[in-house]
Image: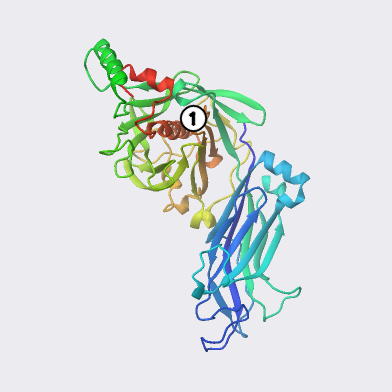
């Protein structure tokens, strides 16, 4: 099946430029702020998406300064929006949904106002809007705007402040996978394209028993313990992903138990549980990534905190993702290395080169050679910020999961450039399963687990 169509809108290279001012720091500029300590920020808006707020550097223009124009590469990203095929189609019927708006504000440092919050010291310098051709961007990169725009007045004047902004819209095709049930129920995983679904993987959930004692004794002991008091350890869970031939192609294995901190019922950040995401390497498994998870502390404690690292030559090289997900409502785990790599990112490949045959376990095109020591896997260094030369930055993957009280069927999106074989896709699917199961593993230990997980506890694991 071919990938699904997605489009990315990248906004960056923001700079506010004021006209030249007096050298006296006590003389206010045209914006009403002190020119020696200018403070500006932008509110970046797109219909039906959360608003982005970004601090903006300030420069001053001299009379002799020539007008220059950048190449359109984005070295500093302020905001990024991703739209699916359905969102692109919806925007065609509602033109306002394709308009990107950037409001620029100055802020008086004396007031100490927080970025994006109204205060007496704030002043709207101006608003810039640009219409985006989202339909064309499905197949080619479009530079919607690049350069300075005057923030006040209908005509450009050297007495008005200016905003420099680059807005680029580019194709970002992704493979989409959907679990047919909760990971602990050993579901099938489908590849999705529009209204079409095709089974591509099966998942097998297991609860590994670390003891060598007799199974019946463990069962009896566990049931008595469960009746007497809630367990204080959740360990040994794993999800193995198999292709349609039954061969294992990825695994998520709980390698550090989820245990409460002393005197509490919580898995704290200081002692998180952890998963290894593994890929087959001959007759053994090779680490691909490590996910740590815990329950966030503080007044808003209903959140799963996580940290994910990728392995390179068996060593965890860098933190690729670190954030939190609501335990009640769920959310998305995302790996996105747009940042400063955007200038090096190439346009994603599209079908037929982007098509992918899961049945054959390889990409439709030729697969790049593996690095020495990388086993059957490809070079995962391109996922990391320190590898811009690989040309594979930008969006990597996302996994959407539901809250602990809901029946979660994780949905996984993986950028086309990060899938060259079955194992590539399966590793991201296994990671999504680990994220989903971590929501349950980080529940308060005074609460019962779901029935499927409690059934596993009768084998001595909870």
Report the residue that reaches farthest toward the top. Answer: 216
Q: Where is residue 291 in the image (x, y as percent from the top left)?
A: 38, 39
Quadrant location of residue 66? bottom right
Pick the residue in front: 121 or 80. 121
Residue at left offset 58%, top offset 65%: 118
| Residue 249 appears in the picture as rendered | yes
Label 1 neighbour load within 10 Å: few <14, some 14-19, many 20+: some
Helix, strand or loop at mark 1: loop
Quadrant where the N terminus is found in the figure? top right
Q: In this view, does 367 lie above or below 243?
A: below
Q: In this view, does 355 lie above or below 110?
A: above
Drawn side of residue 461 relative to residue 199, left or right: left
Quadrant where the C terminus is found in the figure? top left
Residue at left offset 31%, top offset 20%: 226
Residue at left offset 56%, top offset 88%: 22
Q: How many labels does the image show?
A: 1
Report the residue that reaches farthest toward the left. Answer: 213
Q: Name the residue under label 1.
A: 405
The coloring applied to the image is rainbow
Q: Position of residue 23 (x, y in %)?
A: 53, 88
Q: Where is residue 154 in the image (x, y as percent from the top left)?
A: 76, 73
Drawn side of residue 233 relative to residue 44, left or right: left
Q: Where is residue 117 in the image (x, y as percent from the top left)?
A: 56, 62
């Amino acid at each position: 099946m071919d990938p699904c169509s997605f489009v990315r809108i990248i906004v960056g290279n923001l700079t506010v430029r004021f006209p030249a001012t007096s050298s006296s720091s006590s003389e206010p500029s045209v914006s009403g702020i002190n020119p020696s300590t200018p403070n500006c920020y932008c509110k970046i808006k797109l219909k039906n998406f959360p608003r982005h707020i970004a601090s903006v550097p300030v420069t001053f223009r001299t009379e002799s300064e020539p007008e220059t124009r950048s190449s359109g590469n984005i070295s500093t990203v302020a905001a990024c929006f991703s739209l699916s095929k359905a969102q692109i189609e919806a925007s065609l019927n509602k033109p306002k949904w394709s308009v990107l708006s950037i409001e620029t504000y100055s802020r008086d440092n004396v007031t100490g106002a927080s970025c994006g919050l109204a205060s007496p010291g704030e002043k709207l310098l101006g608003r810039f809007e640009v219409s985006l051709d989202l339909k064309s961007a499905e197949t080619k990169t479009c530079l919607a705007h690049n350069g300075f725009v005057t923030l006040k007045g209908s005509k450009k004047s050297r007495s008005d402040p200016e905003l420099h902004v680059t807005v680029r819209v580019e194709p970002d095709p992704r493979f989409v996978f959907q679990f047919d049930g909760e990971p602990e129920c050993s579901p099938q995983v489908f590849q999705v394209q529009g209204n079409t679904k095709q089974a591509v993987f099966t998942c097998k959930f297991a609860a590994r028993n670390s003891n060598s004692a007799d199974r019946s004794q463990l069962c009896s002991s566990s049931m008595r313990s469960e009746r007497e008091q809630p367990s204080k350890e959740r360990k040994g869970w794993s999800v193995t992903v198999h292709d349609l031939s039954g061969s294992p192609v990825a695994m998520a294995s709980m390698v550090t138990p989820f245990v409460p901190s002393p005197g509490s019922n919580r898995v704290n950040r200081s002692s998180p549980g952890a998963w290894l995401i593994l890929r087959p390497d001959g007759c053994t498994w090779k680490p691909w990534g490590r996910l740590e998870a815990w329950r966030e502390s503080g007044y808003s404690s209903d959140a799963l905190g996580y940290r994910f690292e990728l392995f390179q030559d068996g060593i965890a090289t860098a933190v690729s993702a670190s954030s939190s997900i609501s335990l009640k409502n769920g959310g998305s785990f995302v790996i996105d290395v747009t940042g400063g790599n955007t200038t090096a990112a190439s346009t994603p490949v599209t079908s037929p080169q982007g098509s992918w045959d899961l049945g054959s376990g390889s990409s439709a095109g030729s697969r790049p050679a593996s690095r020495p020591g990388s086993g059957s896997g490809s070079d995962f260094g391109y996922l990391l910020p320190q590898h811009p030369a690989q040309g594979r930055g930008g969006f990597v993957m996302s996994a959407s999961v539901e809250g602990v009280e809901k029946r979660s069927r994780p949905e996984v999106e993986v950028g086309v450039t990060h899938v060259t074989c079955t194992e590539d896709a399966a590793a991201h699917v296994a990671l999504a399963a680990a994220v989903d199961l971590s929501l349950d593993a980080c529940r308060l230990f005074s609460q019962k687990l779901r029935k499927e997980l409690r059934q596993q506890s009768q084998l001595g694991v909870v």
